[in-house]
Every structure is written in structure tokens, then in C-alpha cells.
Image: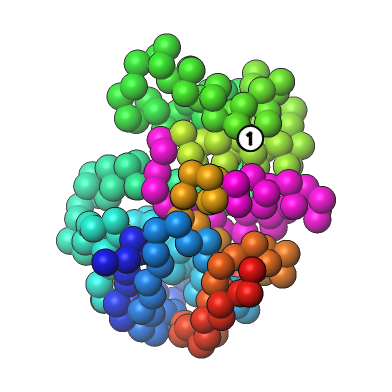
Amino acid sequence: MSLIETKNIVKNFKLGKVGVKILKGISLEVEKGEFVAIVGESGSGKSTLLNIIGGLMPPSSGEIEINGKKLIGLNENQLALFRRDNIGFIFQSYNLLPQLTALENVERPLIFSGIPKKTRKIMALNMIERVGLADRANHKPSELSGGQQQRVSIARALVNNPEIILADEPTGNLDSKTSTEILEILKELNVESKKTFVVVTHSKQVTEYADRVINMVDGFITSIDKNSI
Ligand SMILES: Nc1ncnc2c1ncn2[C@@H]1O[C@H](COP(=O)(O)OP(=O)(O)OP(=O)(O)O)[C@@H](O)[C@H]1O
Ligand SMILES: [Mg+2]
């Protein structure tokens, strides 16, 4: 049993009155501890697939099982709990709350988990240290660089200790030096903490960090390449 398994995932969106098929039968397996990159042209369905795997959006049909749990048929509450316990999300635009400090942003998922305030603070600080931002813990996002904001969002994604990290263009807004720093953090979490990564990207640099590269074209998977690294 793989950590992530999808069978024949189809996703239709309604555009006006017509239905458009965006995912055309995606079957995919990701093993625990893998670092998988998904590449493909803009509009090929990468983000849609990632959102479905993360339980943010239901497929129109198909099966999906993550960490032994079938997602089809779960209600919104059950999906929210599933995400909280299994998935960390990292986005291109960081998605931090601007009025909160870095530390408070990282603490937030722990509130949802019902962890007491003192413990929350210790856990959030630990994660902030882990991504090398201890000296910026009390800064607001607007007082941080893009790379620093992405570090905060990585800390936030990991603070609940999820098995799986889903990242959509995590280095899309960063220069290549900062991208390397972020990728090194992700790879370290992958190798040392055995976290499983599925990373959607346009960047050749990101694919070099991946164990496997999946290519999407127009709603299909066309090839899966084993990287030599
Ligand atoms: N909520 C929606 N309603 C209707 N169409 C949508 C919706 N979300 C995505 N689409 C369409 O689905 C297709 C795939 O979108 P998706 O965001 O998955 O592509 P992508 O591969 O992530 O592209 P990019 O590399 O530009 O981020 C696009 O044609 C898009 O217009
Ligand atoms: Mg996308």
C-alpha cells in the first residue's frame, strides 16, 4: 500500500454552461519518503491534482487513498481533520496572515489542533529555528524577504508534523540562490525526517532535487522519469 494512491481521477469544471474535463484519469502512487516533482505546461492540471490529493477539492470521479484513508465520501469536517493530521501545504505566494508575526503564523495550525498556548509557542519556536529564522520570529510578513516568508510557511506546514508536504511552486517567486536555500530545507526534511513531498514546479532546479519527475500534459500523465540522483 503506497502512502498516496489515486485511481483514475477525473475532474470536470463548469465554464459557463459547458463542462470542461481538466483531469482525464490520473492514476498515481507515491511511496512514503519519496520526493516527487510534477511538471507540465501551464493549464495542464497540476494544481488541480495537488488540491485533490490534499483534500482541498473533490474529484468528479475516481478513487483516492492517502495514508490509509479513503477521501471520497468524507464531509467538510472530516476533510479538515484529515488535512490537519496528514498534510502540510506550501504555496507560491506564501499565504501568511499579514497581521500576525512569523511565530503567530506558525502557531495557528496548532490552535486548530487544540494544543495549549505554552506548548504551542515552544513547538512553533522549534520549527522557526529549524528553518533558520529564530532572529525574525517576531517580525510580520511585510518585514520579511520572500525567502524568509517562504521559510515561515514551511515552518507552518510542518508544525503539526504531517506525513505529507504538498507544495505548489514553492520557489516560484524566489531568485535562484534563495530557491536553493529553500530546496535544501525541503530536502533535509525529506531525508532526515522522512517526510514525503509532492512538489508542483516549472523549475528545472526543483526537479534536480526530486527522486521522480511526473510530466502532465493536458490532464494526463504522459511520463514518469526516475532521476539518476
Ligand atoms: N475553479 C475552476 N473553475 C473552472 N476552471 C478551472 C478552475 N480551476 C482550474 N480551472 C482550469 O483548469 C485548468 C488547469 O488548471 P490548473 O490550475 O490545475 O493548471 P496548472 O497546471 O496548475 O497551471 P499553472 O502552471 O499555470 O499553475 C485550467 O485550464 C484552468 O483554467
Ligand atoms: Mg498551478
Q: In which quarter of the view is residue 140 placed?
A: top right
- Residue 200, horizontal then vertical, whole percent: 56, 65
Lateral position of residue 122 relative to residue 77, left or right: right
Give amino acid for label 1: Val
Q: Is 148 one of the magenta-colored residues?
A: no
Magenta span: 160-188
When the figure is inspected, residue 169 is found, relative to residue 122, above or below; the finding is: below
Residue at 46% in and 85% down:
220
Residue at 22% in and 57% down:
69
Closer-to-camera residue (96/36): 36
All told, the count of numbered labels is 1
When the figure is inspected, residue 2 is found, relative to residue 154, above or below; the finding is: below
Residue at which label 1 appears: 131
* Residue 187 can be seen, yes or no: yes
Q: In which quarter of the view is residue 145 placed?
A: top right
Q: Which secondary structure, mark 1?
A: loop
What is the image's colouring?
rainbow
- Residue 201, horizontal then vertical, whole percent: 62, 66
Residue at 47% in and 23% down:
123
Lateral position of residue 200 relative to residue 162, left or right: right
Closer-to-camera residue (24/26): 26
Residue at 73% in and 42% down:
147
Lateral position of residue 187 relative to residue 218, left or right: right
- Residue 218, horizontal then vertical, whole percent: 52, 85
* Residue 42 can be seen, yes or no: no
Q: Is 185 one of the magenta-colored residues?
A: yes
